[in-house]
Image (tube, rainbow, N blue to C red):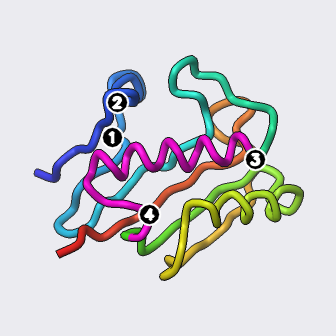
Amino acid sequence: MAERIIPASMQSFYDGYHFAPAVVDGEHVRCSGVIGLNLADGSVPDDPATQFALAFDNLNEVLTEAKVGFADIIEMTTFHVGLQGHLETFLEVKDRYMNEPYPAWTAIGISELAIPGGIVEIRVTARRPG
């Protein structure tokens, strides 16, 4: 059976929504989508840049628990409510977290996310070094 990655701050998602924040599949870590919400209180900021940074911070928590980092990401898919309206801001925030070599990336515009007020969800696959 594949190893489940569940940071303590995300245990409620596993228990309540019945999904693992990530699964280790051989040399790959497959992360579920993360949203830019404050894990401490469940709030979603109105400011897009703040929400994007929180999404990457939440992703970092999953990656760290799985013993990988942003440099190990080989594929990223992002889902955006209002993609064209905030793509430039998203790129600015993304580039604070992700450096070369860049992963494959697909950005998809959608109508809504599972969390009200959420405007981005980030899903990645990383490869464990070694």
Q: Position of residue 28 (x, y in %)?
A: 27, 67
CA distance separating discs 4 and 2 = 23 Å
Q: Circles 1 and 2: CB distance less than 8 Å?
A: yes
Amino acid at the residue labelled 2: Tyr
Amino acid at the residue labelled 3: Ala
Please tell me whether residue 1 is drawn above or below residue 12 in the rendered image: below
The magenta stretch is: 50-71
Tag 3 residue: 49
CA distance separating discs 4 and 1 = 19 Å
Disc 3 crowd, CA 10 A, few/some/many (<14, 14-19, 20+) = some
Disc 4 crowd, CA 10 A, few/some/many (<14, 14-19, 20+) = many
Earlier-in-chain disc, 1 versus 2:
2
Q: Quadrant of the C terminus?
A: bottom left
Tag 2 residue: 14
CA distance separating discs 2 and 3 = 27 Å
Earlier-in-chain disc, 1 versus 3:
1
Q: Residue at x 60, y 49 (%)?
A: 121
CA distance separating discs 1 and 2 = 5 Å
Secondary element at image label 4: helix
Q: Quadrant of residue 4?
A: top left
Badge number at residue 64: none
